[in-house]
Image: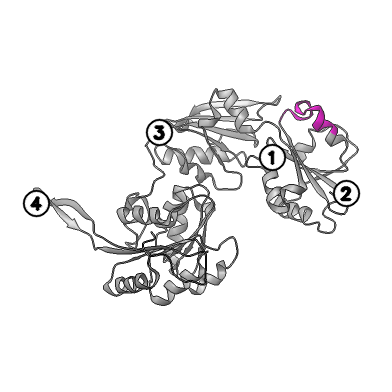
């Protein structure tokens, strides 16, 4: 690493401060020329020869200036040291820096994570605990993990997070859960407060540096798709539960992938996609402003609002998502289906990606039949009957049959088609 190319050293520091650092890390900080951190972190250090800089607000903008070498962002130095809380590679600053500049330009010295400290105090097996971060996401993110019998840790953004999380849990049937707030873990000012969710005092004074531990008692909630329509606010424009489950499975969510949900309506398909895999992202295309507001509200209700973006009418709004990050790995066409939209969605799809389209009307079903003749894939007709009262008895109530096409875009974009029988 040459002097002309600044390197970055990310140092994890716990609430126990200098005393908790290893001799090697202490020596590293003594050799530093420039150290950036929050004022709380800088106060944990003894007098050092380095120039110390408190993060400006917003920190994200200041960090971006430092990482890109903006003039005046930081004094010239071949190595810039950045302080982080606990383990920088666990929902932390280190991961952000590595994504921005590459691992070869970053050296990381981790401390014990807050999750490890919390589990050590509680006697929980960290391998069996779900961990979510409300530092950058909304507190509703906890709703993606809670279910009866599960243990969940929430990394808090500030002192207000515990009250908000307790309110959310109580509203979703988890009022009897054990609720423990662990603050300043591992330091001389460590404080642990436990209660039931329903008994948590929203006015309780909490240190901003805290972790929330929830031992869930409440309804069983599955991450698999197929929630009832009453789980979403909608105006009738919603893919029904059974068809939605089949649709999301056909879209095959798997890791860090992006879904385009075209004609999103209530956002149910995109939300179920995001619930099925915590690594996914979604972009919902919806021209109706009232429905767009519903998508946002439904995403918050299910804890995935931080992973869904909103665009206008398709295909005109496709250009608003024409970035590498938003290039879709999967596309669902559920509303406004016509030949031009289908062709534009197929063109936008990443090679190797999946496209699924559902049709109700004879005209749109005919379009999918034509598409199947040209592009192969899988064409299915799905009919669902549901038992419902008929006087004193039960009778089958048929829903409108759905024709669905699913296919994978070939890696060779010149071919424009996929092997016959691919699904």
- How far is the residue under mark 1 from the one under mark 2? 22 Å
Q: Residue at x 39, y 60 (%)?
A: 422
Looking at the image, residue 304 sits to the left or right of residue 87; the answer is: left
Mark number displayed over residue 77: 2
What residue is shown with label 3? 148
Whichever of callouts 1 and 2 sits on the residue coming sooner in the sequence is 2
Q: Which residues are magenta?
A: 15-27
Mark number displayed over residue 391: 4
Q: Residues within 10 Å of mark 1 (few under 14, many from 20)?
A: many
Looking at the image, residue 230 sits to the left or right of residue 178; the answer is: left
Q: Are marks 1 and 2 in contact (CB under 8 Å)?
A: no
Residue 9 position within the rendered picture, expressed as x and y whole percent measured from the top left: 78, 42
Looking at the image, residue 331 sits to the left or right of residue 138; the answer is: left
Query: In the image, which is nearer the foreground, mark 1 or mark 4?
Result: 1
Residue 77 position within the rendered picture, expressed as x and y whole percent measured from the top left: 88, 49
What residue is shown with label 1? 88
């Amino acid at each position: 690493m040459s002097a002309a190319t600044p390197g970055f050293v990310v140092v994890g520091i716990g609430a126990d401060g200098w005393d908790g650092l290893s001799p090697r890390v202490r020596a590293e900080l003594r050799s530093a020329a420039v150290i950036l951190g929050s004022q709380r972190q800088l106060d944990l250090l003894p007098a050092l020869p380095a120039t110390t800089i408190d993060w400006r607000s917003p920190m994200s903008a200041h960090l971006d200036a430092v990482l890109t070498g903006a003039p005046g962002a930081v004094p010239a130095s071949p190595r810039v040291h950045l302080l982080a809380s606990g383990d920088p590679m666990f929902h932390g600053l280190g991961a952000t820096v590595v994504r921005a500049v590459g691992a070869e330009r970053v050296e990381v010295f981790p401390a014990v994570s807050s999750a490890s400290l919390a589990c050590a105090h509680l006697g929980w097996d960290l391998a069996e605990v779900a961990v979510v971060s409300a530092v950058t996401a909304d507190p509703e993110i906890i709703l993606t993990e809670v279910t009866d019998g599960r243990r969940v840790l929430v990394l808090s953004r500030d002192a207000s997070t515990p009250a908000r999380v307790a309110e959310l849990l109580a509203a979703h049937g988890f009022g009897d859960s054990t609720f423990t707030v662990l603050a300043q873990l591992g330091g001389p000012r460590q404080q642990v407060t436990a209660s039931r969710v329903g008994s948590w005092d929203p006015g309780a004074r909490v240190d901003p540096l805290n972790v929330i531990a929830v031992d869930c008692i409440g309804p069983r909630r599955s991450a698999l798709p197929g929630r009832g329509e009453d789980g979403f606010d909608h105006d009738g424009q919603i893919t029904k539960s059974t068809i939605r489950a089949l649709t999301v499975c056909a879209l095959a969510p798997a890791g860090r992938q992006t879904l385009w949900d075209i004609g999103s309506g209530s956002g149910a398909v995109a939300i179920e996609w995001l619930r099925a895999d915590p690594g996914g992202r979604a972009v919902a295309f919806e021209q109706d402003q009232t429905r767009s507001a519903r998508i946002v509200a439904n995403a918050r209700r299910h804890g995935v609002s931080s992973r869904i973006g909103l665009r206008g009418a398709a295909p005109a709004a496709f250009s608003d998502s024409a970035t590498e990050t938003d290039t879709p790995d999967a596309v669902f066409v559920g509303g406004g289906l016509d030949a031009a939209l289908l062709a534009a969605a197929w063109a936008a799809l990443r090679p190797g990606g999946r496209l699924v389209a559902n049709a109700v009307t004879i005209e749109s079903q005919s379009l999918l039949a034509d598409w199947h003749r040209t592009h192969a894939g899988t064409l299915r007709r799905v009919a669902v009957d549901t038992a419902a009262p008929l006087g004193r008895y039960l009778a089958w109530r048929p829903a409108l049959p759905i024709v669905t096409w699913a296919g994978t875009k070939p890696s060779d974009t010149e071919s424009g088609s996929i092997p016959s029988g691919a699904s």
